[in-house]
Amino acid sequence: MLNRRTFIGVCLGFSLLDAKTFKPWHLGHHGDFSFKQMAKSVYIMHGAKTRDNDAQCFIHNPAFIESKNGIIIIDSGASYIVGKAVLNQIRQISTKPILAIFNTHHHSDHWFANGAIVEAYPNVKIYGHRNIIDSATNMYLQGQERVTNQYKAKTFHLPSYFVEDGDKIEIDGEYFSIQHPKSAHSNSDITITHQKSNVIFLGDIVLESTLGYFSEISSILENIVFLEKLTKQPRYTLYVVGHGTSGDYKKTVAPYLYYLSSIKEEVSKAYKEDKGIFELQEAYANLKEKFTWKEDFYFPLTFLKNHMEFVYAELENKDNSF
Ligand SMILES: [Zn+2]
Ligand SMILES: [Zn+2]
């Protein structure tokens, strides 16, 4: 028979015991954060939308899969503090040990938190693409950078289990298939498909409500090729983006592909007309016009300019390499 407390809890749609013990992560004006179940045994905690002090570097989308005997994390986060908070939030759902971590690429916001997980579970296996090592070393593990970033990461723990395009990895009865475009958002990107749920984790190859950062080891043109490849694959249950909100193909891959392809189209047109990199005003105006398509899109125009120049340089390099 229901007692009075339980009865009220059932009426309100939750258990009073859970309400009492459940503690979300509070981040100032951003509000409360906790893992939400998105598919069978798949949980995601979408990060803050803006990078300010209140966000405490929590701007990515950590996820975990609960297997029979443990937990597999995808992207631990940007700092030791974020890693502790991610672990604490996992604990609200499961007390099983952390068996493994996948890092989707070498940018600090996806792996600096590994140390907090290793501290609690020294035997955790960390998976990633081999290129993470060189790219992270070049970016974070040298000179002053090393000192500053070590403070945020506390200790560096990069992947030591390397995965390649086409690999199928088994961890505690869960199967994951890996895709690796040679160069897209970076040169170390992997996507991870959890086979049982058919959920794909895309890292920063796809971003939602924000725009990407491209460096000398990125390729916008190859990022487009990979998104076209994804488009041809049978639809996944859920597309988990690196930043922003995850969703179906239409809400995630399609708009980002449209953004990148539009840049390619406009810049290629100017390039074919023999316009120089500083003569992209018309292309810029056309693109600005196009992107009224999404009102809540975080769209600083400096990004657009950078991306246009990036594509221009890629087209030029391509031509010069023949
Ligand atoms: Zn990134
Ligand atoms: Zn990122």
Image (cartoon, rainbow, N blue to C red):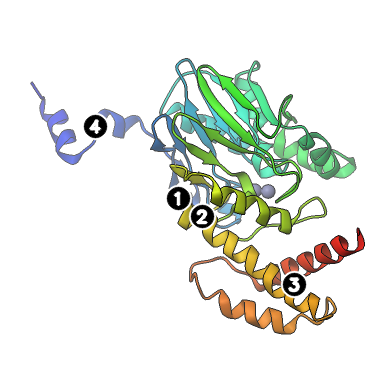
Disc 4 target residue? 16
Nearer to us of marks 1 and 3 is 3
**Amino acid type, mark 2:** Thr
- Classify 26 as above or below 125: below
The answer to whether mark 2 is within 8 Å of ligand 2 is no
**Residue 131 image point, x, y percent:** 79, 37
300 or 309, which is in the foreground?
309
**Tag 4 or tag 3, which sits nearer the N-term?**
4
**Residue 173 image point, x, y percent:** 50, 17
**Residue 116 image point, x, y percent:** 63, 28
Disc 3 target residue? 268
- Classify 279 as above or below 313: below
- Classify 246 as above or below 68: below
**Tag 2 or tag 4, which sits nearer the N-term?**
4
154 or 205, which is in the foreground?
205
Residue 59 shows in this picture: no
| Image marks 1 and 2: residues in contact by CB distance under 8 Å | yes
Disc 1 target residue? 247
Work out how far the residue at label 3 is from the one at label 4, CA to CA, in angstroms: 60 Å
The local crowd at label 3, few if under 14, some if 14 to 19, many if 20 or more residues have their Cα within 10 Å, is some
Count up the numbered dots: 4
Image point 63% across, 49% down: which residue?
204
